[in-house]
Amino acid sequence: MAVRLPSLSPVAWLTVERVTQQVLWLILFAVLAPILGPRPYGLFSIVMVFVGFCEFILLEGAIEALVTIDELDHLHTSTTILVGGGISVAFGLAMSAFAPWIGSLFHDGDMKYIIWALAPMPLMSALSAPPVAVLRRSLKYKQLAVRSILGLTIGGIFGIVLALAGAGVWALALQVLAQRLAELVIAWIAVPVRLGWTWSGPHFRELKPVAMNVFTARMASLVTGQFPRIVLGYTLGPTEVGLFALANRFLDVIIFTTVVPRTAVGRIELRSTKIGSVEFAHDFAKMVQNVAILSFPFFLGVTAVVPELFRIWLDQRWAPGVVPVQLILLSGLPLALFYCMDAALLAGSLSDVFRRMATWQGITLVATVLCTAPFGLDVTCLALAIRPWLLLPFFLVVFGRACRIPVYAALRPPLRSLVGAISMAVLLSLPFLRPAWLGQGVDFVFLIVSGVVFYVIYLFLFARGEFKALVFELFMFRS
């Protein structure tokens, strides 16, 4: 008898996907981190900078182009496969050719072999783009959730077995390769789209403008996320990169579970309203409000409890990562607003503005890291935490003019959530919530429960309507 999954809203299914992904990652990290230590994670992170450059920008550019066009047909998908597949093969060959030089640059002889093993991943991403785009267009996030969860589970089991067998960094490399292969197969099974590689000039010209803008923007975004790892790896070594990667992973866990689900669905929903209209401004404000209610307490609450989490979870090799994690998490508040603005710009077909803002993100990050990396990991993370706060006023003005939304309309919705999240973080920092008579681990659970109860009470007292609307949206069933 087939198992029938519940019919939840798209936001709920995307949230389920992201939360499950991050829970599985936490389980994998809890198993693998004590076995491997920071250095293999650092080496793997450096390799994924080069592999991810080819993989991420090709996948997202193709998906956004296919999602944006009004009428999607077979020639759109087949042209995308032909162009994306050709570019990905060229990227893979170029990456393989430079692999020995990259290994020598970071003084690691095994790095070139890992790059060669992961070279097929950009092609896998290019082939995954059409079915993923079709599922996103139709808001079939249940199928996307199943694909991601099964892929991560298969890859995770593979990685744990290899780590226990003493494979070292190869456990991480072959884990992600198995995961991508599983996701590719599942994606094509889930959609009624034919696999083809027929060229069509008119269809390519229709796809090209959005694809190129998103391609450029995602390239800048990738620089924002990955460039520090290259500089820190060259300046400080793989161990420091492993600690930095862990800090960014904490940030990613919160963004992918509390920000991305709402902005991804909001990007589709905003397409039904006219940019600059009252309806567009209202839907955007609702998206920002929901993102703030969910994400702000996580950014600030986790910052407050990170020392206790490291104490009960990881060994002393990871202890220098506490301060970097706290600093990077503080950058999450403005980043959540950036995600909301990106979703609105793409929904309003303003991919050129989206590209310019992403480019400025990349430029400022490169300058920040180059100036601070020689002074150590903590100084670099402090500068990276300050950078998005300095950019936020400028981006709000550019966004407001492009979408014809007043700046105060973008800032007003998250204010109450911000006050509640700050109050909760202050409460969690008070010494009386860490009584000495509580056992190790129990005090951490007590902190988490105290923070959740305080924030829910705050929302019930000061943002009851917004909280009820968010709960209804998350858990609304669809027939």
Image: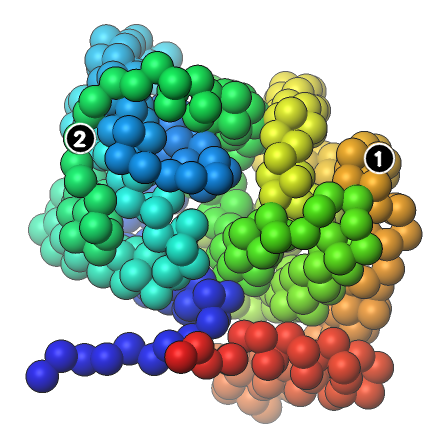
In three-dimensional space, the C-alpha distance between marks 2 and 1, rounded to whole angstroms, equals 42 Å
Q: Nearer the viewer, residue 1 or 288?
A: 1
- In the displayed image of the protein, which residue is found farthest to the bottom? 437
Looking at the image, is 366 positioned above or below residue 188?
Answer: above
Q: Position of residue 305 (x, y in %)?
A: 61, 68
User: Which corner quadrant holds the C terminus?
Assistant: bottom left
Q: Which residue is mark 2?
A: 196
**Amino acid residing under circle 2:** Gly
Report helix, strand or loop for mark 1.
Answer: helix
Specify whether residue 17 is in view: yes
Query: Residue sitting at 39 percent across and 18 percent down?
Result: 202
Residue 401 has which mark?
1
Residue 128 has which mark?
none
Q: Nearer the viewer, residue 97 or 100?
A: 97
Query: Residue sitting at 23 percent across and 60 percent down?
Result: 150
Specify whether residue 115 is in view: no
Q: Quadrant of residue 141?
A: bottom left
Left or right relative to 458: residue 313: left
Q: Position of residue 204 (x, y in %)?
A: 38, 20
